[in-house]
Amino acid sequence: MKWAIVGLMVGATTVGEVLQAKGMRRHGEIRDFRPGAIGRALAVLARNRFVIGSIGAMAISFFAFLKLLSVTDLSFAVPVSAVTYVMETVLAKYFLHEQVNGLRWIGAALVVCGVMLVSL
């Protein structure tokens, strides 16, 4: 049961963060932080399908994390959620077409090693 919840949480977090990055790239950098400009940016972002999808995925992730905390220890739940870093690195390379250098791949591999140690 706990591994199914971990899978749901990790998948939803990964999808949410990748969609968020895609949506913000489509929108562009926010440079004006006056109240009116922030309101206009929020109005535009509220119509951005990637941002909307991101919000939905992150809500699923949040509730899956709450459920995970009800069935396992925090000392397990938080470290195992780090698998999202690996999945996000892979999707950044192949979905967002980012340049991912060797050091980032090594970092992702180290995260996998750490998650395996915690899950034993």
Image: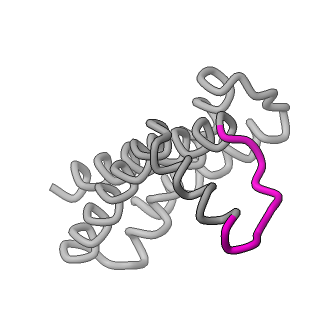
Residue 24, compared with residue 120, is above or below; it is above
Residue 118, compared with residue 90, is above or below; it is below
Q: Quadrant of the C terminus?
A: bottom left
Q: Residue at x 84, y 32 (%)?
A: 102
Q: Residue at x 49, y 53 (%)?
A: 116
Give the x, y percent position of residue 14.
Answer: 48, 44
| Residue projecting furthest to the front | 36
Q: Is residue 80 left or right of residue 93?
A: left
Give the x, y percent position of residue 18.
Answer: 55, 40
Q: Quadrant of the N terminus?
A: bottom left
Q: Please tell me in which quadrant of the rendered image residue 25 appears.
A: top right
Give the x, y percent position of residue 21.
Answer: 62, 42
Q: Is residue 45 left or right of residue 61?
A: right
Q: Is residue 4 left or right of residue 16?
A: left
| Residue projecting furthest to the left | 1
Q: What count of labels does the image hold?
A: 0
> Closer to the camera, 48 or 3?
48
Residue 81, compared with residue 66, is above or below; it is above
Residue 34 colored magenta? yes
Q: Residue at x 64, y 44 (%)?
A: 24
Residue 7 colored magenta? no
Which region shows up in magenta? Answer: 27-36
Q: Residue at x 66, y 40 (%)?
A: 27
> Closer to the camera, 25 or 10?
25
Give the x, y percent position of residue 88.
Answer: 58, 40
